[in-house]
């Protein structure tokens, strides 16, 4: 995965000690997922995203661990955060996206080739078959159809989330044009350019 402008390999004191484990050949039978955490001690104030050491522990404990990142247009994410009153302003919300996604991309750059997959949210919704096949291939699954079948079923009978994420129907609707001004993309930093949301 190519480095993004202005960013080098992830620098974490706990990564070098276990990096040698990540060089082992992947084993689809031992695929696991880990998540980054978001710090929301004050939901109605400025929220910040930060990486958890958990994902590095996954690499240490299971060198075959693989990671999938599903990303969404920062302007749509920012409007969603603002709508839910999880953040104070649209500008801050876009900055949070840039910080959070930037940390994910930095982490991915430190992984061996073939251990990370990045998927656009739009593709997951609009092309579930192709996206499901991509995920299945990445994980080494013999049959990836259950992934796309599940995604398609969610349009009719979505799995409920706990509060405050209750507007499930909105998750399966993508505006023809991203919400918000293109100038907001500048606040998202290099992550928006790397993922194709902003021009180089």
Image (cartoon, grey):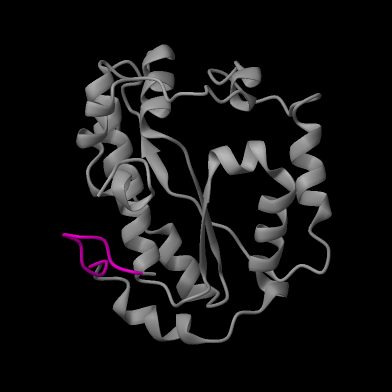
Pinpoint residue 187: horizontal percent, then vertical percent.
20, 34
The N terminus sits in image quarter: bottom left
Which residue range is magenta in the image?
Answer: 2-11
For the point 62% across and 63% down, the residue is 32
Pinpoint residue 98: horizontal percent, then vertical percent.
28, 41
**Quadrant of the rendered structure where residue 153 is?**
top right
Is residue 8 something one can see in this rendering? yes
168 to the left or right of 200: right
For the point 60% across and 80% down, the residue is 26
The verdict on residue 7 being magenta is yes
For the point 54% across and 40% down, the residue is 121
10 vs 135, nearest the viewer: 135
The verdict on residue 93 being magenta is no
Where 50 falls versus 10 (above or below)?
A: above
Q: Main secondary structure of the magenta part?
A: loop
Pinpoint residue 3: horizontal percent, then vertical percent.
28, 67
**Quadrant of the rendered structure where residue 91 is?**
top left
174 to the left or right of 196: right
For the point 69% across and 67% down, the residue is 137
Is residue 50 something one can see in this rendering? no
View extreme (left): residue = 6
32 vs 151, nearest the viewer: 151
Where 138 falls versus 23 (above or below)?
A: above
41 vs 193, nearest the viewer: 193
152 to the left or right of 71: right
């Amino acid at each position: 995965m190519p480095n993004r402008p202005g960013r080098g390999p992830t620098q974490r004191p706990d990564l070098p000690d276990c990096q040698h484990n990540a060089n082992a050949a992947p084993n689809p039978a031992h695929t696991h997922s880990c998540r980054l955490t978001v710090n929301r001690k004050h939901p109605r104030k400025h929220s910040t995203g930060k990486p958890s050491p958990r994902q590095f522990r996954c690499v240490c404990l299971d060198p075959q661990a693989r990671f999938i990142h599903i990303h969404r247009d920062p302007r749509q994410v920012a409007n969603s955060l603002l709508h839910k009153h999880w953040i104070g302003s649209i500008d801050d919300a876009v900055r949070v996206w840039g910080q959070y996604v930037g940390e994910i991309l930095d982490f991915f750059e430190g992984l061996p080739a073939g251990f990370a997959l990045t998927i656009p949210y739009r593709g997951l919704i609009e092309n579930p078959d192709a996206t499901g096949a991509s995920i299945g291939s990445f994980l080494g699954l013999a049959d990836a159809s259950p992934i796309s079948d599940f995604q398609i079923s969610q349009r009719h009978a979505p799995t409920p989330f706990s509060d405050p994420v209750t507007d499930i129907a909105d998750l399966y609707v993508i505006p023809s044009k991203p919400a918000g001004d293109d100038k907001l993309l500048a606040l998202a930093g290099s992550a928006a350019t790397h993922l194709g949301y902003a021009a180089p």
